Image: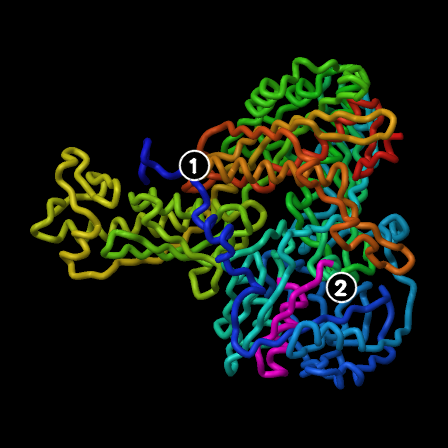
Amino acid sequence: MSQGKDAAVGKPMDRVDGRLKVTGAARYSAEFEVPDLVHAVLVMSTIAKGRIRQIDTQASERAPGVLRVITHLNAPKLTFDKPEQRALIDPKVGKHFPIFQSDTIYFNSQPIAVVVADTLERAQYAASLVQVRYEEQTPATTVEAAMAQAFPPTESSQGGRHADVVRGNPDALASAEVRVEGSYTIPIEHHNPMEPHATIATWQGDKLTLYDKTQWVYNTRKHVALTFGMPEENVRVISPFVGGGFGSGLRSWPHVTVAAIAARQVKRPVKLVLTRQQMYTSVGFRPYTVQRVALGASKDGKLTAIVHEATAGTSMYEEYTEATLDATRMLYACPNLVTRYRLVRLNTNTPTFMRGPGEISGVYALECGLDELAYTLKLDPIELRMRNYAEVNPEDGLPWSSKFLKECYQVGAEKFGWSRRNPQARSMRDGRYLVGMGMATATYPMFRLRAVAKARLLADGTAVVQSAGSDIGTGTYVIMTQIAADALGLPPERVRFELGDTDFPYSPVQGGSMLTASLGSAVQAACLAVREQALSLASTQPNSLLSNAKANEVGVEDGRLFLKQDASKGESYTDILKRANRDYIETEKDSEPGDEKQRFSIHSFGAHFAEVHIDPDFGLVRVSRVVSVCDIGRVINTKTASSQVSGAVVGGIGKALMEYTQMDSRNGRFINANFGEYHVPVNADVTAIETYFVGEPDLKANPLGARGVGEVGIVGVSAAIANAIFHATGKRIRDLPITPDKLL
């Protein structure tokens, strides 16, 4: 790859897709222009458990412009997949939601019918005319009420791991010199991306094209093909732009299948766009989780025992599990540890991954517990963490591929001004406001999966690189352009990267902070291979200045290959291809992980520092400042990486202080399913956010040396804020969100 001042990787390069977005030229899933398009509107159940006794669609069918009303009575029978056939992201235990396959009601606002009409307004009106009578049963709606029925998830739903993990002496907590214990709750939270989920489905014979909002086009293709019992190659999924996902677009949800059913029945392209309210029961959410954390330590601050238990909600038809306890097992050196994970079945739709899934919930409880232990020991919270710093992964004994967490603490403390903190709770003020400072550790594992990229070098000296990845706003377009540009030795403006289409080579999901390491490695490999092809052409051309040159003897810059020992001797890509009478050369390369995870423990790390100002009379909390320092290996683009962390901090503020999907426990209905009553941070809630990166390229992890930033940037933020609130008030609030009523 290109190095030095001309290298694109590492620079704060603007998004190559930015102009398309700000001018409105970027095409999102609901915006594709398809001839003869009609509209579909879902009808949702009004109970959470029971059966449909009667569904009357006659008035709806007679309404103007209506083409079809589809229910379980006239929908086609679908073939739902076996667990071993499922995509990586889907729960391995249970069945996908059986859309329109029976009269059973599993949750409130479950899709029970779809109306297709020639205009959206006519479809909406006709949907309001569908009449339903139910046989209603009492639903299970809260984790606490169903705790007696909690069960350990099967190992297959947890990637082969048992629900209970014990290290060392399981009874060590009882003999600890110092102990703290607390119970923590994480409410249901919803992703709420700006762009609602939408699908346009169009059939041409037995081939189906879907314009879909998804974070993984190949997963959508696989799910739909299995559902309809058709070859995967007969399904094309297109998704070039995604207006935010946060995990909501990882799976293929029922509305995608419904759009395909409707399009096949009416023999016209069908558009189905979820309303904001329907988003709350159609595309998953962060599960309600109850945790117990108990920590034991010696008087000098060394951890001697950790007990961490978690119980979370799942649906009636799938086992959704999270890595809630994984960070606890590896983050700190502790000889004795017990973790227990349980599930409770509820009458909700299936939860799903939401930014920082599992780790964000587990680390919240763990890091608040560490803060409480620090106060009990009268020890600085950073010092407590340093005394229990894990030099190797305590879970498996593997060395870290790279770890600069100490530097995260040091840089963060310096930039934040941690030394100005008075350790006594409720000791700092700014006028009438209470001031608090808190911190927490962040971690998230690096995942890497097989990815494939195609690179084409054109005779005009430009390049096109393709793969079926996604860009949910994280900057995939620009960072893959930077990687390709350096590998080819071209200026970034002469490289075009294309994504979001199953006609392109295979890419894994954009989620779990894995796409850069996975797809970026494939892009680099494909571009290096094309560069080698160009050199191979030149070395066999008798009139070339690079005749008989070997790869290790040749450098590249600005689209020109040259001898390292004599830079005046070289050839441009254009000259080489024209001499060979070639319009282009191209190659396709895949990149997949090796045995690095058997040799190393590979994680991103970070530290978050938060300052709060609190009105003592009204309990209003203002996050006045956040400093986040992350160790993510090689930083591909400093601007987009900083943007990722800043956005993650905003999400952490929302988690700590605002986000809470409220349910009426009597009927299982979400009662604040809108932007007016589900509160997320707005500009006025966000002040100074500083982001810093430490460390070095982690070449033991992957060829790029890059690890993920999107998840680690949010893990620990809510804990840092909660710890700052305790420092300001002396009140330990363990149940999120921390609202004024809990502080008064």
Residue 12 in view here: yes
Query: Is 266 colored magenta in this rendering?
Result: yes
Quadrant of residue 261 in the image?
bottom right
- The magenta segment is 252-276
Marks 1 and 2 sit apart, C-alpha to C-alpha, by: 42 Å
Query: Is 683 colored magenta in this rendering?
Result: no
Q: Position of residue 79 (x, y in %)?
A: 65, 75
Residue that mark 1 sits on: 699
Q: Position of residue 726 (x, y in %)?
A: 79, 25
Residue occupying the point 46% across, 45% down: 15
Residue 325 in view here: no
Quadrant for the N terminus in the image? top left
Residue occupying the point 67% across, 41% down: 651
Looking at the image, residue 182 sits to the left or right of residue 306; the answer is: right
Dot 2, how many residues are within 10 Å of its Cα: few (below 14), some (14-19), or many (20+)? some
Dot 1, how many residues are within 10 Å of its Cα: few (below 14), some (14-19), or many (20+)? some
Looking at the image, residue 16 sits to the left or right of residue 196; the answer is: left
Front residue of 730/705: it is 730
Residue occupying the point 60% across, 41% down: 711
Front residue of 696/423: it is 423
Q: Position of residue 209 (x, y in %)?
A: 52, 72
Q: Amino acid at mark 2?
A: Tyr
Number of marks drawn = 2
Quadrant for the C terminus in the image? top right
Front residue of 614/169: it is 614
Does 224 appear above or below 373? below
Q: Are marks 1 and 2 in contact (CB under 8 Å)?
A: no
Residue that mark 2 sits on: 317
Q: Amino acid at mark 1?
A: Leu
Does 425 appear above or below 517? above
